[in-house]
Image (tube, rainbow, N blue to C red):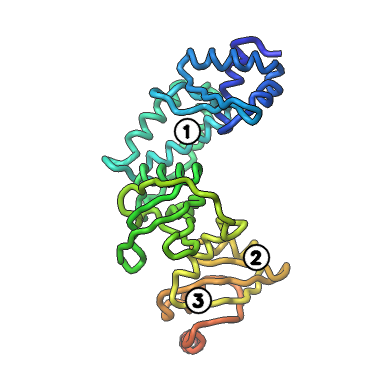
Amino acid sequence: MYGTAERLLRLLSLLQARRDWPGADLATRLEVDVRTIRRDVERLRSLGYPVHATPGVAGGYRLGAGAALPPLLLDDDEAVAVAVGLRTAASGTVGGMVGGIEETSVRALAKLEQVLPARLRSRVGALQAATVALPGAGPTVDAEVLTVLATACRDQERLRFGYAGSSGAATDRSVEPLRLVCTGRRWYLVAFDLDRAAWRTFRADRIDGVPVPGFRFTPREPPAADLAEYVARQISTEVYPHRLVLRVAAPATALAHRIPPTAGVVEEVDEHSCLLRTGASNLDAVPYYLAQLGYDFVVEEAPPGLVERLREVAERFARAVG
C-alpha cells in the first residue's frame, strides 16, 4: 500500500503516461478503492492539476491542459531522453516563428539540468561530451507547424494548408492526417488527401504557414502496416522520374547499412541477395551512384537508356586501367 503523498505522485505519473484512465484501472494500479481515487483526484485539482472526469460506466479520468504548466514526473530514462532531445533542438534542427526554437530549448534544458540528480546529470554530460553535431544545410521546420500536425494526428482532426510541391507550384490541401515521420533531416506528414482521394506524403518544410484544424474524422485504413517503410518508398522512388530495381549480391541487412531510407528501399530475397528499389532525376549520375554500392548487382528493371549508359561507363573505366 502507498502512503497518501506517495500515492498522489504515483497517480499523477499514471495520468501523465496515458490519455484516458478508467477509475477502476487506477484503483487497481494503486491498490485502493474507487472512492479513494476520487478523493485523490480532488487533491490534485486543489494543487492546480486539471484532471477531467467523465461519468458513467465507461467513464474515467484525463489530465487536461490548464492555464499554467504543472510539474511533470519523469523517470530516469525519460529525463535523460528529454535532456538529449532538448540538446538536439538547441542545435537548430527545428526552426521557429521568431528567432527559432533554439533559445527556448536552451532555457528548458537549463531548468531540467538544475533539478537532475547527479547520476542523471553525469549520463547527460557523457552524451554531450561524446557527441559532435555536424552542421547541416537541410531545411528547418517551424516548431508551431510540427505541433499543430502532431496534435491533429493525435486528435484525428482534418487540416487545411497551403503546400508547395517539388515543382514549386502552390496548392491548397485538405487532408486527414495520420502520422509524422522523421528521417533525421526532414519531417514528413502521411495524410489522406481529400481532394485527390488518395494517400499522400507531405514534406513539413513545404507547408505554407500554420495549418488550420477542422472537423474530427473517422480514421481510414492506413496505406501500409509499416509507415516508416511506406514513407521511405515514397521519397526514395516514387518522387523520381527514373526508377530502377537491382538484384544485389549481398544480404539485405548489409546493404541497408549502406543505403539510407531516403535513397532506396531494400527488400530481402534470400540470405545472400536482396532487391534495391531506387530512383534518380538524372540518368547520367546513376552509374556513378551504383559504383558506390560495393557489391555485384544485376539490373532487373531500368528506364530506357540506362543500360546503354552503364555499358559506356564500364568501357570507359576498362580503358582507363588498360
Instruction: Report the residue at 35% width, 64% height from top.
Output: 165
Label 1 sits on a secondary structure element that is helix
Mark 3 Cα-neighbour bin, 10 Å: few <14, some 14–19, many ≥20? some
Give the percent coordinates (x, y) of residue 118.
52, 22
Q: Is residue 130 above or below residue 176?
A: above
Place residue 31 in its image quadrant: top right
Place residue 91 in its image quadrant: top left
Residue that protrudes farthest toward the front in the picture: 56
- Is there any visible trace of residue 14 in the rendered image? no
Q: Is residue 281 above or below residue 90?
A: below
- Give the amino acid at mark 1: Ala
Name the foreground residue: 96 vs 260.
96
- Give the amino acid at mark 3: Arg
Separation (CA) of disc 1 from disc 2? 34 Å
Q: Which mark is residue 83?
A: 1
Report which residue position mark 3 lands on. Answer: 243
Report which residue position mark 2 lands on. Answer: 252
Give the percent coordinates (x, y) of residue 280.
45, 74
Q: Earlier in the sequence, mark 1 or mark 3?
A: 1
Name the foreground residue: 104 vs 273.
104
Q: Nearer the viewer, mark 1 or mark 3?
A: 3
Name the foreground residue: 164 vs 254.
164
Label 2 sits on a secondary structure element that is helix
- Give the amino acid at mark 2: Ala
Q: Is residue 78 above or below residue 169?
A: above
Work out which quarter of the rendered image holds the N terminus and state it.
Answer: top right
Name the foreground residue: 168 vs 219.
219
Instruction: Report the residue at 61% width, 81% height from top.
Output: 298
Say whether residue 163 is left or right of residue 56: left
